Amino acid sequence: MKADRFRGVGPALVTAFAADGTIDEAAYRAHVEWMIESGVDYIVPCGTTGESVTMSTDEQAAVIGMAVDQAAGRVPVLAGAGTNSTAEAIEGAKAAVRAGADAILTVSPYYNKPTQEGIFLHYSAVAEAAGVPIIVYNVPGRTSSNISAETTLRLAEVDGIIGIKEASGDMDQVMTILRNRPDGFLVVSGDDALTFPMMAMGGDGVISVAGNLVPAPLSAMCRAALAGRWDEALALHFQLLPLMHAIFVESSPIPVKAALEMMGRAPAHHRLPMVGLQEVNRPLVEEALRLAGAL
């Protein structure tokens, strides 16, 4: 699959749970359908926003399979599959491929804080074993280690690795990658609020939490940016910016699930250790939804 199929907006899908903690397949499929009907470019099941760390391997494969089946080839499926054990990350990637994923988004190993060489060898092993395109995910705020620009550019030369989801928040690092990347290597924002500035420097879109709430205007913003219609893109960026900030007032996906409940889309059920949004933060999220035109 060509890398450019993953330009634009890929919502990092929330996983719908019932009150008893089981996966709510009907609600999940309805959410996937709304995303596709709203014009997103691809979908991303079983990422951080999907609470994948609270799912068993079989549950993750089942959720990816639901997304693949519901998409029915209309958009590509970039499945989350990563952990801090290289052997387990490989098995997770293979399971996602068996479930029908077109490509794999895999997070840098967390907690054990590998060296840059360890990160490089980890991703090289996963890419060799997966048999489908790989997008690297750099999110130091959750992993406690950064993938340096130099390591990213090394990984860009590895067969099968087609891009990076950059959520370091380090714009100097992002600019270094954008300036020096090989042709065709994707640089995708992992921070909703930084999508516009990254795209203004040549970035390729966003793997988005906000996309769960405002898929149509966010997709319009990225399409405008990719087409060079910067005034249109900037206006949409500023319209959506308060919501992009509000949905991180607590650990994601707590606020985005609360927002979906406010919109009447799905109940905000989580699995522990995640819990519901604090009441003190509800007015902030509600007002941000109104400003974005989602309420």
Image (cartoon, rainbow, N blue to C red):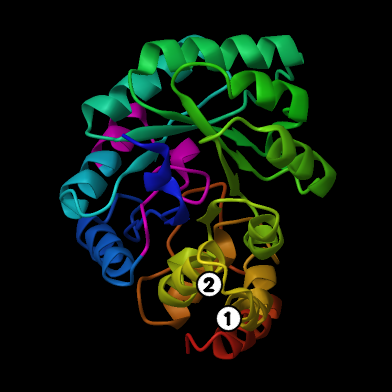
Task: Choose the circle earlier in sequence order: 1 or 2.
Answer: 2
Q: Which span is picked out in magenta?
A: 40-62
Secondary structure found at label 1: helix
| Closer to the camera in the image, 106 or 160 | 160
Q: Which residue is mark 1?
A: 232
Secondary structure found at label 2: helix
Residue 101 in view of the camera:
yes
Q: Which residue is mark 2?
A: 221
- For image coordinates 41% across by 32% down, the residue present is 104
| Closer to the camera in the image, 228 or 115 | 228
Count every numbered label the image shows and give the total: 2
Q: What is the CA distance from the residue labelled 1 to the residue labelled 2?
A: 7 Å
Q: Position of residue 22 (x, y in %)?
A: 30, 49
Judged by its main secondary structure, the magenta piece is loop
Q: Which mark is residue 292?
A: none
Looking at this rendering, what residue extends furthest in the right direction? 172
